Amino acid sequence: MQLPAEFLSRMRGMLGKDFGVFIKSYESPAQRAIRVNTLKIPVEKFKRISPFSLEQVPWENSGFYVSAEGLGKTVYHAAGLYYVQEPSAMCAAPMLEAKGGERVLDLCSAPGGKGSQLAQYLDGEGIIFLNEINFSRAKILSSNVERLGIKNSVVTCSSPEKLAEEFVSYFDKILVDAPCSGEGMFKKEPNAIPEWSVENVKACAVRQAAILDSAYKMLAVGGRIVYSTCTFAPEEDEGQIENFLKRHTDCKLIKQQKLYPHEFRGEGHFYSVLQKNGGERRDVRLLTPSLKDKKLLSVYRQWESEFLNIKFENLHLIGQTLYSLPDAMPLTKAQTLRAGVRIGEFTGSRFEPSHSLAMCLADGEAQCLDVDGHTALNYLHGLTFNCGQTIKGWYVVAFDGFPLGWCKVSDGTAKNKLPKGVRI
């Protein structure tokens, strides 16, 4: 691996006698890890059914080192039981100390690793905004939120500056996993090496400062910002925080740490914990859930009574798509890709459930067809399968009790309703 000469020169100056072991760490393979999705399964239960050998990641209780390949192609992954995440990338979110009932923002969220980690700490209570400025990356983020069954989330595609105009002093906790020069990921992502330059480091630092200022504007008094990067550059890390504290004197530094690959089992990461001691906590206007068409409401409630064992509230209709919104859903001008649970679509006098609904259901909340591993894989490939002659209608296809998606049963055949985009 040929690392940039200017990068090596700077790291030699930063690390001194440890520079040799730092360079030697690039000879070992990148670590693989997963994070158990505790919104769907307790860690101890996952340990009992896991197809992989698991070794604890020290800074995240639900994180585990694994050596297996093909982690994104298993039935359990499709069921949203775990998220594939680089182990060092799990270090920042716990520092936010997010808890149920809070207003939380992951400002630079795609593809969703840290944001979904935060959602686990909220455990369905409060609201979490997951924002991504790039629309194609925001769609990937939205897909991951769906698979993981995060019901109290709002996925937006907005610049931090525009979001800050709407949510002044609103959020209790904000994660800024800032776009950076990516030095810490050279081993895992060698394609980033040719793109590195001193100029790019400086450009990243300018962009990060602007993002941090937007986060400060949105943070309520007493709230926390956790700023993180996957770079070693002081301009993007400690220097960035030093300059931020000069601009915002009502904030204080709680803790910061840099993870080097020769000291920890993972790639390079940095985080800093900041607290805001001035200002106020503001509310914003809320979106009133509305399904005014009594006929459509009757159609949905009838479908719900036939095929679900749970009643959804906060119903809101956009076009012909029905949503169950999070409690205290704010009004926002930001492009919103997902809010709460997308329940399904009205087509004429019929209602068809969405994949999002299936993925947020817990055991016993819907009619299920529990299938074996072979049938589950065939289903995930988009195939139909045979089932009992006596049943009819919408059923959730499940493996070990965990939903994979919908099928519609008639004449002993389960017609596959899995969207093409989530098939494996």
Image (tube, rainbow, N blue to C red):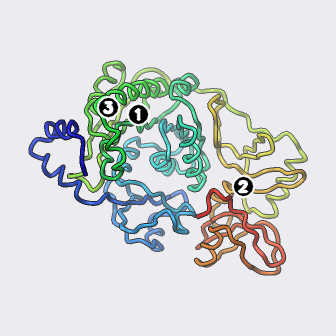
The residue drawn where x is 30% and y is 42% is 183
Q: Quadrant of residue 206?
A: top left
Query: Relative to 166, is 223 on the left or the right?
Result: left
Which mark is on residue 354?
Answer: 2
The residue drawn where x is 36% and y is 39% is 228
Task: Determine the secondary structure under disc 3.
Answer: helix
Residue at far left of view: 17
Task: Determine the secondary structure under disc 2.
Answer: loop
Marks 1 and 2 sit apart, C-alpha to C-alpha, by: 35 Å
Q: Which residue is mark 1?
A: 225
Q: Which residue is mark 3?
A: 201
Q: Quadrant of residue 374?
A: bottom right
Residue 391, horizontal then vertical, whole percent: 81, 76
The residue drawn where x is 26% and y is 39% is 232
Sequence-first tag of 2 and 3: 3
Which mark is on residue 327?
Answer: none
Which amino acid type corresponds to the residue marked 3 in the rendered image? Answer: Val
Within 10 angstroms of label 1, few (less than 14), some, or many (20 or more) residues?
Answer: many
Observer-nearest residue: 418 or 8?
A: 8
Sequence-first tag of 1 and 2: 1
* Nearer the camera: disc 1 or disc 3: 3
Q: Are marks 1 and 3 in contact (CB under 8 Å)?
A: no
Sequence-first tag of 1 and 3: 3
Q: Quadrant of residue 327?
A: top right
Give the answer, above or below, for where 396 lies relative to 389. above
* Nearer the camera: disc 1 or disc 2: 2
Residue 116, horizontal then vertical, whole percent: 50, 49
Marks 1 and 3 sit apart, C-alpha to C-alpha, by: 22 Å
Task: Determine the secondary structure under disc 1.
Answer: strand
Query: Relative to 365, is 212 on the left or the right?
Result: left
Considering the image in quadrants, where does the C terminus appear?
A: bottom right
